[in-house]
Amino acid sequence: MKLSCSQSDLNTALQLVSRAVSNRPTHPVLANVLLAADEVTGKLRLTGFDLSLGIQTSISASIDESGAITLPAKLFGEIISKLSNDSPLVLTSDEVSQQVEFTSKSGTYQVRGLLSDDFPELPLVESGTSLKLNPLLLSNAIKSTLFASSTDDAKQLLTGVNLTFDGFGIESAATDGHRLAVLNLKNILSQTNDINNSSEFEKFSITLPSKSLREIEKFLSACDTSQPINLFIDKGQVVFISFDEIITIRALEGSYPNYSQLLPDTFSNILEFDRKEFIASLERIAVLADQHNNVIKIATDSSAKIIKISTDAQDIGTGFESLSVSFKGESFQIAFNVRYLLDGLKVIDSNLIRLSCNGPTTPAVFSPINSDVNFIYLVMPIQIRN
């Protein structure tokens, strides 16, 4: 393999694909990135793959000789990032020694690699379901729910986000057992989808690992929002394609919990208030609450139309805030993990918020008011003993 390319283009591509390289590889070659040069297309393709998440991208290059090799991702990336960017970078590989030489204006370096034949093939979906999605809306669906997924590997399914497609839109949901975030978008599917009749579309769900979805978020943020991205799903494998970039994810196995059963049918207490003011009060209270179990209490006063937010950090101090609300129901007191509240409130895109609940031990639901977004955030209260 022999080629010359831009140092900045190669550096950018390396940073992208290296995010799919395992920190603890089960096989030495999985610590490497695959470089494949094609003289016909004039492209250098780079691939990172940890067997669960795969990222592939291509850059333009002047290729004298086609070939492929794998190089240690971390070492390769650090060398390329420090080379001069004001002249072409020449890469030459020796098939016998599996060594690659990089020559730039500032100097020459040699790095030993591994055979490309040992690198696992990136799984690509050839059949199954094919969809075209709006990248901005898909990014919002992921961002609005990802935070509520579990970090406990013992609850493997809950460490992902569940995506349900029904032919009209997508429902994104995540829960860690203490809270639940659900966003329903009806206009995410591009009009160019090959679906003649949405009523004939077979509804299906997939659960994707949160770690991989964080990379999808970055991928989507760089996409042209005026152009749909291609999504292919088959046999537990999901592939996202946009121009020269491909990301493949292995879905989590198993049936996601029926989270709709957690949502109460009716509520006896409904509070409406300003989201930014509520967040500001919680962030001030959190300074003390963080010192002792993150618990804050919210007490309503139906006659005064205010809520009182308080915390008691034992042996450290106490805090108290009040906030004007519109309130329907009976006076009550309820306690929450303040971090759970802040996580959910910060993804809601609305000035006004509704809090619906029945009592201090039953689920509380936060939702936006006067918003086009169909989003709910359910939080289980903390039981407090007087």
Image: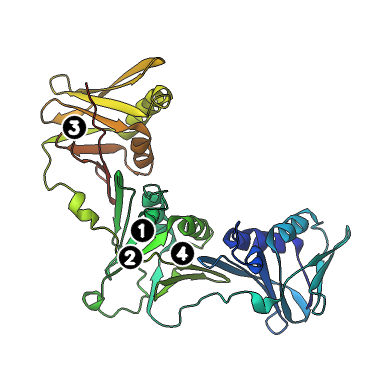
From the image, state whether disc 1 or disc 3 is nearer to you: 1
Whole-angstrom CA distance, mark 4 to mark 2, is: 35 Å
The residue that appears at 36% across and 47% down in the rendered structure is 148
Which label belongs to residue 157? 1
Mark 4 lies on residue: 226
Query: Which of the marked residues, 4 or 2, is nearer the chain's N terminus?
Result: 4
Do the residues under discs 1 and 3 have CB atoms within 8 angstroms? no
Amino acid identity at mark 2: Gly
Secondary structure under badge 2? loop
Mark 2 lies on residue: 254
| Quadrant in which the C terminus appears | top left
Q: Is residue 43 visible?
A: no
Mark 3 lies on residue: 360
* Other-residue count near label 2 (Cα within 10 Å), few / some / many at <14 / 14–19 / ≥20: few
Whole-angstrom CA distance, mark 4 to mark 3, is: 46 Å
Query: Which of the marked residues, 1 or 3, is nearer the chain's N terminus?
Result: 1
